[in-house]
Image (cartoon, rainbow, N blue to C red):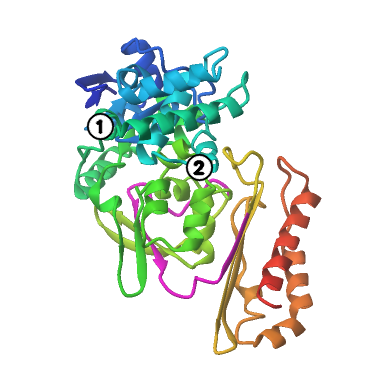
């Protein structure tokens, strides 16, 4: 299958006529001879291939070329012509922040993306911004120092032009209508692709025909009604983090999804549809009792997320359906507890995760809901156990606490994984106890 995709590359309008599932990384290096974008891990972890797409840092190894319709892409070759690059280049050299240089193009892109959005970052903000960029030579202290120096130089020059006009324009991408996408899905049986951060890593990307839904307007909006906050399934994690309608529990979970370049690309719908028990947003939507709005060319279905996962890697999504929206309750979710146990923060694939909701009204527990991720093949959500605490006062809940914990201890049977079964079980029970104690139980 071949597809013509038109987008802007370093200020020049171009068209790509080829395999729509080709990695942008490969298109840049082999088709466009822009070899400043380096090929490192091809899994979105090292950041060597980072570019700017529509004003945001993204790892090009996880971007399918077919998703770029109407986009603006800037590589290190384009960025190197800006005044911001000159300031960063001088600052990096002044503190010897470069050794072998392999990681530096991506590191420079991350630095520029940060300073475009935040001209006066703290050290913590700098470290967060480059957290998805691995450097094997220098460590990171010199790089952090260089970015701080460049920020002061840019601020001293009062140079807003380089960040706003030269570098970080945000454009409105071309996009198909939702109805058109549903008809294509029905007639072609293509695999929907929004963020692609899982599919591109899987290695099967060149064996599938994709329907790119990342820019469908109805799937990119976040709105609220009397009962729900409605998140478009194509919303990126960064969109969710930045939107004032987003509840704190979901914002906190999204902030712990990998590094900025991944959050700028990965989407809610993709995170849910991959069927993984490790999916960060799915855990939150599960514990809050959220509902999926599924659409096909023939109609609409509303399905509780708790009914969406029949098994590992499996979903209840029909072949001709799209996840269009996630409906998250507006009320009763403010008092929450969320913990994620992972390895390196910027990778942050959960080894175990936990979310709990405790809604107390007039001294009575109106709702208690807990969920565990990355423990078994699906997210654990057991309302029949949580009912033991609902309708009770805090003191009454204390009297059944041990029975409640014993019920979960019996129910949770972790499967083997990257960490031991006993370790994962201990984490689950410790987090559950901490959740109860934080609520006075």
**360 or 406: nearer the eye?**
360
Compared to 402, does 86 lie above or below? above
Q: Which residue range is magenta in the image?
A: 312-339
Left or right: 322 in relation to 287: left
Q: Which residue is mark 1?
A: 161
Pick whichever, 116 or 197, lies toward us. Answer: 116
Q: Quadrant of the N terminus?
A: top left
- Residue 103 within the magenta-colored segment of the rendering: no
Give whichever of discs 2 and 1 has the lower sequence position.
Answer: 2
x, y (%) of residue 88? Answer: 42, 23
CA–CA distance in space, label 2 to label 1: 22 Å
Q: Are marks 2 and 1 in contact (CB under 8 Å)?
A: no
Residue 310 coordinates in the image, percent (x, y): 54, 55
Q: Residue at x 76, y 84 (%)?
A: 399
Crowdedness of circle 1 by 10 Å Cα count: few (<14), some, many (20+)?
few
In this rendering, the answer to whether 224 lies above or below 262 is below
Disc 1 is placed on an element classified as helix
Q: Residue 58 is drawn in which quadrant?
A: top left
Q: Is residue 60 left or right of residue 334?
A: left
Q: Which residue is mark 2?
A: 122
The answer to whether residue 423 shows anywhere in this view is: yes
């Amino acid at each position: 299958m071949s597809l013509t995709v038109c987008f802007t590359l370093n200020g020049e309008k171009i068209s790509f006529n080829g395999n729509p599932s080709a990695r942008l990384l490969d298109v840049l290096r082999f088709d466009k001879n822009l070899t400043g974008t380096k090929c490192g891990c091809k899994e979105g972890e090292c950041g060597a291939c980072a570019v700017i797409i529509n004003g945001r840092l993204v790892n090009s190894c996880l971007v399918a070329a077919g998703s770029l319709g109407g986009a603006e892409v800037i590589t290190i070759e384009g960025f190197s012509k800006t005044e911001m690059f000159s300031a960063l280049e001088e600052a990096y050299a002044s503190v010897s922040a470069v050794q072998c240089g392999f990681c530096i193009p991506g590191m420079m892109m991350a630095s520029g993306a940060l300073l475009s959005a935040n001209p006066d970052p703290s050290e913590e903000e700098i470290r967060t911004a480059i957290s998805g960029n691995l450097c094997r030579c220098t460590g990171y202290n010199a790089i952090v120092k260089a970015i701080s120096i460049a920020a002061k130089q840019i601020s001293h020059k009062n140079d807003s032009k380089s960040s706003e006009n030269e570098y970080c324009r945000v454009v409105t991408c071309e996009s198909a209508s939702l109805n058109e996408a549903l008809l294509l899905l029905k007639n072609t049986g293509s695999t929907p692709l929004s963020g692609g951060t899982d599919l591109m890593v899987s290695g099967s990307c060149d064996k599938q025909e994709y329907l790119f839904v990342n820019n469908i307007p109805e799937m990119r909006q976040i709105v609220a009604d009397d009962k729900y906050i409605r998140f478009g399934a194509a919303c990126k994690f960064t969109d969710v983090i930045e939107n004032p309608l987003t509840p704190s529990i979901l914002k906190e979970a999204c902030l712990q999804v990998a590094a900025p370049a991944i959050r700028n690309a990965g989407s809610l719908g993709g995170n849910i549809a991959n069927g993984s028990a490790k999916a960060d947003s799915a855990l939150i939507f599960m514990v809050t009792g959220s509902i999926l709005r599924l659409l096909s060319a023939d109609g609409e279905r509303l399905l509780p997320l708790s009914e969406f996962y029949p098994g590992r890697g499996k979903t209840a999504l029909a072949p001709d359906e799209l996840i269009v929206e996630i409906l998250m309750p507006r009320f009763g979710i403010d008092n929450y507890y969320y913990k994620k146990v992972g390895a390196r923060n910027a990778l942050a694939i959960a080894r175990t995760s936990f979310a709990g909701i405790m809604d107390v009204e007039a001294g009575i527990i109106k709702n208690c809901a807990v969920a565990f991720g990355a423990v078994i093949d699906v997210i654990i959500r057991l309302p029949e156990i949580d009912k033991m605490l609902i309708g009770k006062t805090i003191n009454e809940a204390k009297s059944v606490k041990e029975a409640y914990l014993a019920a979960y201890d019996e129910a949770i049977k972790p499967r083997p994984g990257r960490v031991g079964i006993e370790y994962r079980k201990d984490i689950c029970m410790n987090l559950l106890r901490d959740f109860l104690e934080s609520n006075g139980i």
